[in-house]
Image (spheres, rainbow, N blue to C red):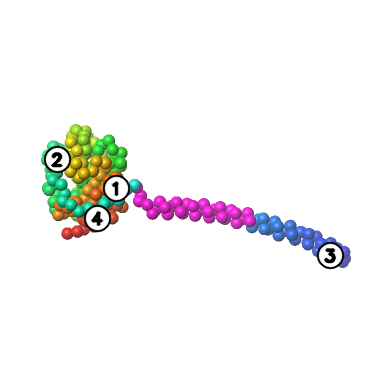
């Protein structure tokens, strides 16, 4: 009887180290899986946070400026002559663009949506197409989402008046006729709300 008990204890003692080694290996495996899963989760979270911290679409940041708006008058797509002074009581975003310019076309839906959201507050966008004939610009506008005024600028008078050759570029004129913001490059909705909306709210 005592010999059997002794053998059983001996067998248990022999299995003890193996048991703990097996448990240790299992725990290490579980920890490795958890680290892998949480590592991936943290990586995804970091990527999400990075994307959330940047604008939803590309955008340049405007320069704050202060000078009188240039005297500029051009024909619109319907052949009627308009001038910037015709909009003196409004906040005006002048957007110099071209039908052949990819970033210009990419920002049009954003500009259109912002225009519709704020037009009742005394805000207007004037899109000035640089260099294309009136018929081509009219055709482009008719097949797009643009409802704000479009002018035709065959000789790039607007680019010279505002002193910026890169497309697209945009300038915001307040109700007193002063240029307050200048953009070079594509604009997203976040930047419009951040910089233009406060100007619209000014009396």
User: Which is more N-terminal, label 3 or label 2?
Assistant: 3
Look at the numbered disc 1 and give the secondary structure of its residue: loop
Callout 4: 10 Å neighbours few (<14), some, many (20+)?
A: some
Location of the C terminus by quadrant is bottom left
The picture places residue 199, in percent across and down from the top left corner, at 21, 56
Element under label 4?
Answer: helix
Q: Is residue 37 magenta?
A: yes
Disc on the earlier residue, 1 or 4: 1
Q: Are marks 1 and 4 in contact (CB under 8 Å)?
A: no
- Label 1: which residue? 187
Please report contact status of discs 1 and 2: CB closer than 8 Å, yes or no.
no
For the residue pair 98 and 6, the one nearer the viewer reads as 98
Residue 115, given in percent of the width and then of the height, sits at 23, 49
- Residue bearing mark 4: 197
Residue at image point 84% right, 64% down: 6
Q: Nearer the viewer, mark 3 or mark 1?
A: 1
The answer to which of marks 1 and 2 sits earlier in the sequence is 2
């Amino acid at each position: 009887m005592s010999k059997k008990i002794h053998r059983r204890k001996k067998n248990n003692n022999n299995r003890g180290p193996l048991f703990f080694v097996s448990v240790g290996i299992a725990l290490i495996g579980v920890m490795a899986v958890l680290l892998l899963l949480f590592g991936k989760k943290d990586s995804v979270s970091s990527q999400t946070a990075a994307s959330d911290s940047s604008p939803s679409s590309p955008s340049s940041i405007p320069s704050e400026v202060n000078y009188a708006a240039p005297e500029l008058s051009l024909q619109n797509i319907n052949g009627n002559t308009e001038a910037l002074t015709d909009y003196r009581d409004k906040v005006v975003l002048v957007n110099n663009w071209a039908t052949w310019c990819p970033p210009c076309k990419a920002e049009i839906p954003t500009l259109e949506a912002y225009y519709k959201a704020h037009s009742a507050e005394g805000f207007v966008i004037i899109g000035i197409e640089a260099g294309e004939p009136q018929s081509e610009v009219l055709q482009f506008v008719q097949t797009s989402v643009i409802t704000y005024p479009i002018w035709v600028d065959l000789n790039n008078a607007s680019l010279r008046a505002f002193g910026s050759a890169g497309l697209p570029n945009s300038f915001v004129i307040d109700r007193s006729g002063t240029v307050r913001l200048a953009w070079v490059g594509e604009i997203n909705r976040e930047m419009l709300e951040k910089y233009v909306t406060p100007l619209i709210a000014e009396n």
